[in-house]
Structure formats: structure tokens, C-alpha cells
Image (spheres, rainbow, N blue to C red):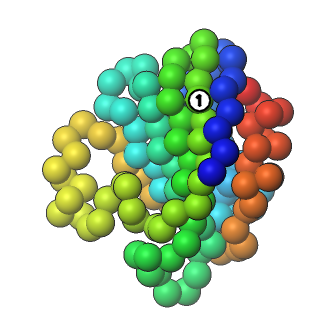
């Protein structure tokens, strides 16, 4: 697990969406988002993994947590399990009233933590 603090001008939801689009577009990863329901959000949680033919809930992935404000945010990148800390099934998703969640993706290989940090260093 590694954590960095950034001073930036992007709201967290825009930063997380930009990162998610990069993961999908440049690295063909499957991405799942969950964020604070308040605007502007004070946290966003992203998971990314290889998009395989058979989806498995306990598959390894990379967890990215963004916390803070548009003036300063703390970003943590760690390994995790797909679906853990976001939602286990559609029933539990409905219990997260107001939390924005979306999932999308395509086929490809998993991006490395080093590549994610390089993108964040360049874009924050």
C-alpha cells in the first residue's frame, strides 16, 4: 500500500472519472466506482482489474481511494479483491442510498500501480 498527497484543482469526482477513463481507454481495464453522495464529494473509491471471460467476486484487483478536497487530496493505492469494499450484490447496492456507483469495462490486462502513480503525478 502506498499513499501520496496532491495539491490540485480538479474536484474529486472529475479526477476519479478522468482516472477511470484512462484505465479503461489506455489500459483496457474493467473499472468500478463508488463515491460520496454529497457534492462536491469528499471521497471516491475505484477498483480496477483485468476483464476476463468469467467474472469472479474474489478476483484480485487494484483499489484506489481518493479523499480530500479540490485543494488537497490523499490518494491510496493497494491490492484488493474485486467487489470487496464496494458492493457484494445488487441487493446490498440498494442499501447505499445516495452513493453513486457505476461499473464498466472492456477486455485487456491489468495496469500496474506504478503506471497509475505515473498518470496521477502527471494529471493532478
**Residue shown at 18% from the left, 53% from the top:** 94
Q: Position of residue 95 (x, y in %)?
A: 16, 50
- Image location (x, y in percent) of residue 39: 38, 21
Position of residue 27 measured from the top left corner of the image (x, y, whole percent): 75, 61
Report if residue 100 is visible in the image.
yes
Taking 20 as reference, is 38 left or right? left
From the viewer's perspective, is residue 65 above or below residue 113? above
Asked where in the image residue 41 lies, by quadrant, the reply is: top left
Residue at the spot of label 1: 74
- Compared with 118, 13 (above or below) is above
Which quarter of the image is occupied by the C terminus? top right
Query: In the visual, does 120 lie left or right of 43?
Result: right
- From the viewer's perspective, tell me whether residue 83 is left or right of residue 96: right
Rendered residue at 55%/86% (across/down): 53
Numbered disc 1: secondary structure: strand
Q: Is residue 74 left or right of residue 122?
A: left
Residue at 74 percent of width and 49 percent of height: 116
Q: Is residue 105 visible?
A: no
Of the pair 27 and 43, the residue shown nearer to us? 43
Amino acid at each position: 500500500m502506498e499513499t501520496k498527497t496532491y495539491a490540485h484543482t480538479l474536484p474529486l469526482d472529475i479526477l476519479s472519472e478522468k482516472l477511470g477513463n484512462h484505465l479503461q481507454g489506455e489500459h483496457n481495464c474493467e473499472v468500478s466506482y463508488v463515491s460520496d453522495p454529497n457534492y462536491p464529494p469528499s471521497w471516491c473509491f475505484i477498483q480496477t482489474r483485468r476483464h476476463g471471460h468469467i467474472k469472479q467476486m474474489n478476483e484480485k484487483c487494484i483499489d484506489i481511494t481518493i479523499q480530500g478536497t479540490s485543494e488537497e487530496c490523499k490518494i491510496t493505492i493497494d491490492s484488493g479483491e474485486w467487489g470487496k469494499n464496494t458492493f457484494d450484490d445488487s441487493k446490498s447496492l440498494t442499501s447505499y442510498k445516495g452513493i453513486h456507483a457505476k461499473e464498466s469495462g472492456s477486455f485487456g490486462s491489468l495496469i500496474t500501480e506504478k503506471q497509475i502513480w505515473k498518470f496521477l503525478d502527471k494529471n493532478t
